[in-house]
Image (spheres, grey):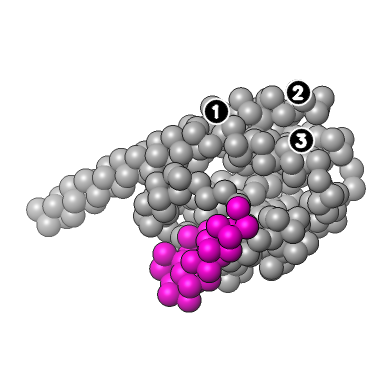
Amino acid sequence: NVDMCFIIVIWGRKTMRNQQLQTDYTEDMVGYWKERSHTYSKDNRSQLENEKKTVWENLILSNTTQEKQLNILDVGTGPGFFAVLLAQKGHHVTAVDVSADMLERAKENLDYYQVHADLRLLDGNDLPFSDDTFDLVISRDVTWTLQQPEETLLEWKRVAKPGGQILYFDANWYYHLFDEEWMKLHLENEKIKSQNGLPIHDKGKVMEDIARELPMSKRLRPTWDLEELPQLGFRNVKALKNLNSVIYTEEEQLKYRSKPEFLVIAEK
């Protein structure tokens, strides 16, 4: 069938083009975080040592259903904030990231705090673990970067044990690029940051260009998560919203005023 062959060829070209775009975005993202790995690691260390550390711990562990030593997967660990935090509480942590530079920072921080986690470099969205492996899959400020969010969340679900949980923190980091009211809030926040001498990263435009092409940037969250996760087979899905005043110091609240952090909790 000529028409069917034509459709298959077009679909194949589109798939190859999408795969190339995903590779390009991933490389751009890795390049951005390579340049920011040292400053981001410094920020993470300050969070591991300020008065909000125990708040992070309690927020995570109070929303898990098990009290035993947990087998935890930290996806997109970056400089290892969650890896250090949860290893210090006696849990077994496996931490993965697509950036080798971030994993170097994570190793430095784990050594500095004298705790251990199994660090793995990822190549793509597929996780190199068997089905039903982890009690808890956790991440922070990662889901907005997903190029295939539904497929990736299903992969997280695959490696979780039956009854295991997926907890992820995130915010609408770039929703302002697609919404006028959010843009007003963003610009007001940038002005406040400038007035208070808070850093504005000179590479921010690079990330904005990447974010414009990422599907999650266009979705208002956690509304999307609450609607989508049950359709993907997750159970007992809920979200805790507007966590900035809970998890951030006063300076961090100024910094992230227009980007309220939320926590999504779901069960396999």
Q: Residue 96 in the image: state x and y as whole percent.
A: 61, 34
Q: How many marks?
A: 3
Q: Is residue 14 above or below residue 117?
A: below
Which element is circle 3 on?
Answer: helix
Which residue bears the numbered disc 2? 111
Which residue bears the numbered disc 3? 84
Q: Is residue 35 above or below residue 146?
A: above
Q: Residue 38 in the image: state x and y as whole percent.
A: 59, 32
Q: Residue at x 43, y 75 (%)?
A: 180
Crowd around label 2: few <14 · some 14–19 · many ≥20 (10 Å): few
- In magenta segment, residue 194: yes
**Type of the residue with mark 3:** Val
Between 130 and 20, the residue placed more toward the observer is: 20
Q: Give the mark nearer the N terminus: 2 vs 3.
A: 3
Which element is circle 2 on?
Answer: helix
Crowd around label 1: few <14 · some 14–19 · many ≥20 (10 Å): many
| Cα distance between the residues tagged 2 and 1 | 16 Å
Q: Quadrant of the N terminus?
A: bottom left
Give the prevailing secondary structure in the magenta stretch.
helix
**Type of the residue with mark 2:** Asp
Whether pointer 1 and pointer 3 mark residues with C-beta atoms closer than 8 Å, the reply is no
Q: Residue at x 41, y 68 (%)?
A: 178
